[in-house]
Image (cartoon, rainbow, N blue to C red):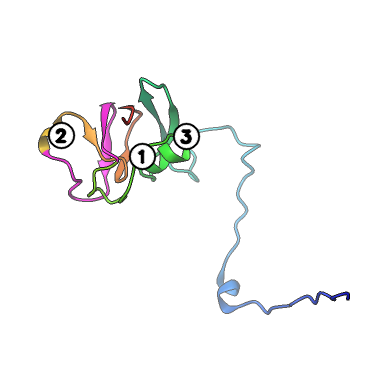
Amino acid sequence: HLIKKQAIHRRPTALANRLQTRVLPSPISQPMSNDSPFAPPFFIAKCEPSGQQVDAWADQSLLDSLEGGGVDWPSSCRTGTCRTCLGQMVSGSMRYDIEWPGLTPEEKAEGYVLPCCAFPESDVVLMDAS
């Protein structure tokens, strides 16, 4: 038996009528720049001693950047409470999106970070997760 497909025509919704479309410049014709008004700045996150390196976006947690770049970093809660992702930062700077990351003042002083809720503010170097 042949089944004839019927096209379903839907009328535009009120939401669709309110959406506006903007044409952005082609990325191919534009020079590559970290200063683009369309993209957040990014930094480099490097793991030592393995040498793994990924782009670390300023608007994305370091854990998301590491995983997106193929680094197998331990994680669980993604809220800064379980400490599964705890790592030591050798160089660089981070900011947190929560008031109290689950770190003691001593751990902070020794460079420990929670990548699940830390956002890079510069290039960073981390000791490989063990």
On the image, the x and y values in percent for residue 44 come to 41, 29
Q: Quadrant of the N terminus?
A: bottom right
Q: Main secondary structure of the magenta part?
A: loop
* Label 2 to label 1: alpha-carbon separation: 18 Å
Q: Which mark is first along the chain, 2 or 3?
A: 3
Q: As drawn, is 37 to the left or to the right of 114?
A: right
Foreground tag (1 vs 3) = 1
Q: Residue at x 48, y 43 (%)?
A: 39
Residue 87 is drawn in which quadrant? top left
The residue labelled by disc 3 is 34
Question: For the residues carrying marks 3 and 2, which lies nearer the camera in this image?
Answer: 2
State how far apart marks 3 and 2 are (Cα): 32 Å
User: Mark 1 or mark 2, which is nearer the start of the sequence?
Assistant: 1
Q: Is residue 100 left or right of residue 64?
A: left
Residue of label 1: 62
Q: Is residue 122 above or below residue 15?
A: above
Pointer 2: what residue? Answer: 107
Name which residue type carries label 1.
Leu
Secondary structure category for the residue under label 1: helix
Which mark sits nearer the N-terminus, 1 or 3? 3
The reply to whether residue 114 is visible in this rendering is yes
Label 1, residues with CA under 10 Å away: few <14, some 14-19, many ≥20: many
**Which percent across, then down, holds residue 106?**
11, 33
Q: Which residues are magenta?
A: 85-104
Q: Pick the residue in front: 18 or 45.
A: 45
* Residue type of the residue flagged with mark 3: Asn
